[in-house]
Image (spheres, rainbow, N blue to C red):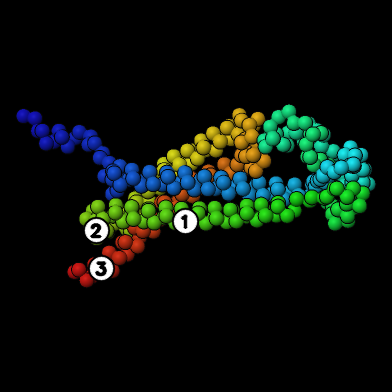
Amino acid sequence: MIDVAALARRLPRRRERPAPIVPPANVAGRALLTVIAIMTFLASLTLGAVSLVADTASSWQADISREVTVQVRPDDGLDMDAALRTIQMLALGTPGVSGAAVLDDAATGRLLEPWLGTDLALDELPVPRLVVIAVDADAPPDFAALGRSVREAVPQASLDDHRAWVSRLVAMARATVLIGIAILTLMMVATVLTVVFATRGAMTGNRQIIEVLHFVGARGSFIAAEFQRHFLRLGLLGALAGGTAAFAVFALVGWWTRANQATPEADQVSALFGSFSIGWVGYAGVVVLILAVALLTGVTSRLTVTRQLAAIDMLSPVDA
């Protein structure tokens, strides 16, 4: 007669994988993943906007040190061409000036095209003419003295170094950067609080299992590591989804500005933000943000579990 029990003992047993403490997928987990994806998407957009504005402000500041303009207003009896040549020769003879060029009718027409349309007859319109002066950034000229010389040579002319309005734009850009950093910080804090509540909810749903494991000798670091591994995975998946969506938005907007460079709207956007590209620094920042969100999610979950287990240890003698 066959001994079934002995035969069963000889057969290789299937090694069962222990059930995880935290359920691998549930409604709360999917909701947390969605929240992390949305937070990462908004944070990535904020980071990209901050990077774009900061680069634009630096470009504006660099433009101040490279170029100024002289505006010659039309007047009765004024020979415009002679006045422009006089300003050009005066600028070229000034120390610290590296070049001077008169904007011709075609260039002036392109500047006015977004407001006055095409085919402008500049001779029939009282349109001021411009002389663009390139300055040496290392040894700039005395702008006050240059302005006086320009007014003495041509009373209808005035020097504009752009410092007044560009300084306002730079101040506004810096304020925008600070606001963006504050918004980014608030988003990260909101993400941390969301992970804390999600971790506590997961612990509440598995409280009996956690308490049994804890009281039979399972170390708190083991239980915390299980939660950390679970929430780190959720954080990484959500951050990747949000960061990828942000990359798509940046690429789409950049493609739109490049494809519509001839339109007035795109010209205005290009004048303010250049090519509307955040560059490799911005993209690298988004990648760092994705990793930071995932790491922050895992660490927050671990710290939350550790604090909850410490609270259980404090209450256990009382319950006994």
| Mark 2 → mark 1, Cα distance in angstroms | 34 Å
Name the residue located 50 percent from the left edge and 53 percent from the top edge.
184
From this view, report whether residue 202 is shown above or below residue 279: below
Label 1 sits on a secondary structure element that is helix
Side (left or right) of 162 relative to 304: right
222 w.r.t. 240: above or below: below
Q: Position of residue 48 (x, y in %)?
A: 56, 45
Q: CA distance from mark 3 to mark 2?
A: 12 Å
Q: Is residue 299 visible?
A: no
Q: Which residue appears at 61% of the width and 45% of the height?
A: 52
Identify the residue at horizontal 34%, vertical 55% (top origin): 197
The quadrant of the image that shows the C terminus is: bottom left
User: Which image quarter is the N terminus in?
Assistant: top left
Q: Residues within 10 Å of mark 2 (few under 14, many from 20)?
A: some
Q: Looking at the picture, which amino acid does disc 1 mark?
A: Leu
Give the mark, 2 or 1, whose residue is nearer the N terminus: 1
Identify which amino acid the numbered label 3 is placed on.
Leu
Q: Which residue is mark 2?
A: 211
Q: Mark 3 vs mark 1: which is more N-terminal?
A: 1
Q: Mark 3 sits on what residue?
A: 315
In x, y percent, where is residue 301? 38, 54
Given the image, on which type of amino acid does mark 2 rest? Glu
- Label 1 CA crowd tier, 10 Å (few <14, some 14–19, many 20+): few
Residue 186's tag is 1
Q: Are circles 3 and 1 on residues that touch, CB within 8 Å?
A: no
**Horizontal placement of 299 versus 258: left or right?**
left
Q: Position of residue 132 (x, y in %)?
A: 82, 42
Question: Of discs 2 and 1, which sits in the foreground?
Answer: 1
Q: Residues within 10 Å of mark 3 (few under 14, many from 20)?
A: few
Check residue 279 in the rendering and tell me which mark sits there, or answer none. none
Lower position in the chain sequence, tag 3 or tag 2: 2
